[in-house]
Image: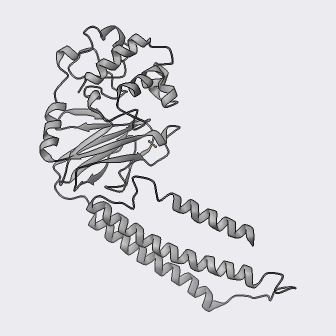
């Protein structure tokens, strides 16, 4: 008996510990997320009641009919029609109720007819590319949106299957190569909402995050106006002092405006210095962290493509200084 009780305590503890992570799907920040959370809570409640009833019956049977209390061969039973009908019909009824509630939530969270912006999100191992087709913006890491309006999000992948999830704003949507999946989000208040990849996609799956940054319309418009511009000519990497070092980067990274930096397999770096983090949510954006990333990407995020191109010692400290100053000036 003692070990069964231990298993139960550990099991409940493990189940509950998953609920404290931030951001939590239990702390919705939009009407859509609220509806999903309500459904989630109702299903949890039903599931909890079923769990308690079944667990209580199991514990009762274990205790009441233990060999100590009823020695000898137990009474042999063959079928009980009423009981069998009951334990088939009750769960079926429960599932029909859950189905009804789910269909209802699916209908009420369906994509709104009109959205002000369509933003494309493309999963890569292991970062998210963010494209504003109408504004001609290609960026990564931070998705800026205006508050209070619905935004269409078109999700796809260039390699394996990922899943795009902003727990505080919306449900999950799968990212497949060669197929566009559509969802929508709306933030009612300004804020910064963490996005997780929620489909296992390789060793750095857990380090594949990004942020949705919801801003008042005027602030968002200013960001669009600034970010849709190409980098000014004095910041093109064909110019000294960065030219000699940056030639190693142009195969994978682009700087809009530059005629040499046109790589597309890595993040577009045109507004790199304005982003809030490095390596898809692993490090906050600052000089010290950027130097650490450039010194040895594999130390920060083992297995990343950047780590195949840049190994510990590939760049001298002087080159890292030049690159860091340059990258942080791209805003
Ligand atoms: Cu991408 Cu998991």
> Residue drawn 29% across and 26% down?
269
Q: Number of labelled discs?
A: 0
In terms of image quarters, where does ligand 1 lie? top left
Could you tell whether 89 is left or right of 157 in the image? right
Q: Which quadrant holds residue 54?
A: bottom right
- Placement of 155 over or under 98, stated as above or below: above
Q: Which quadrant holds residue 137?
A: top left
Tell me where residue 64 appears, x and y as whole percent: 74, 85
Is 48 in front, or is 258?
48
> Residue drawn 33% across and 45% down?
155
- Placement of 141 over or under 104, stated as above or below: above
- Of all residues shown, which one is farthest toward the right? 72
Tell me where residue 87 appears, x and y as whole percent: 58, 83
Tell me where residue 76 appears, x and y as whole percent: 79, 87
- Placement of 12 over or under 279, stated as above or below: below
> Residue drawn 53% across and 37% down?
203
């Amino acid at each position: 008996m003692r070990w069964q009780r231990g298993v139960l305590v550990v099991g409940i503890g493990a189940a509950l510990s998953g609920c404290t992570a931030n951001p939590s799907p239990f702390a919705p920040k939009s009407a859509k997320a609220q509806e999903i959370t309500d459904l989630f809570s109702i299903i949890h409640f039903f599931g909890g009641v079923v769990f308690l009833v079944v667990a209580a019956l199991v514990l009762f049977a274990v205790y009441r009919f233990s060999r100590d209390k009823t020695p000898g061969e137990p009474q042999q039973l063959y079928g009980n029609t009423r009981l069998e009908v009951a334990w088939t019909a009750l769960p079926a009824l429960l599932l029909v109720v859950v189905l009804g509630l789910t269909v209802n939530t699916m209908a009420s969270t369906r994509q709104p007819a009109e959205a002000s912006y369509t933003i494309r999100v493309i999963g890569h191992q292991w970062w998210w590319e963010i494209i504003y087709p109408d504004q001609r913006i290609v960026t990564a890491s931070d998705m800026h949106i205006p508050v209070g309006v619905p935004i269409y999000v078109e999700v796809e992948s260039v390699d394996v299957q990922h899943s795009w999830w902003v727990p505080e704003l919306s449900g999950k949507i799968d990212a497949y190569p060669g197929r566009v999946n559509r969802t929508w989000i709306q933030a009612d208040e300004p804020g910064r909402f963490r996005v997780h990849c929620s489909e296992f996609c390789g060793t750095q799956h857990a380090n594949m995050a990004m942020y949705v940054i919801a801003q008042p319309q005027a602030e968002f418009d200013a960001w669009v106006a600034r970010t849709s511009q190409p980098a000014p000519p004095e910041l093109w990497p064909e110019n000294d002092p960065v030219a000699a070092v940056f030639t190693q980067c142009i195969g994978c990274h682009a700087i809009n405006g530059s005629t040499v930096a046109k790589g597309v397999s890595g993040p577009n770096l045109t507004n790199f210095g304005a982003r809030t983090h490095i390596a898809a949510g692993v490090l906050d954006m600052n000089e010290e962290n950027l130097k650490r990333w450039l010194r040895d990407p594999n130390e920060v995020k083992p297995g990343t493509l950047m780590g195949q191109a840049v190994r510990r010692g590939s760049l001298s400290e002087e080159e890292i200084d030049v690159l860091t100053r340059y990258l942080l000036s791209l805003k």
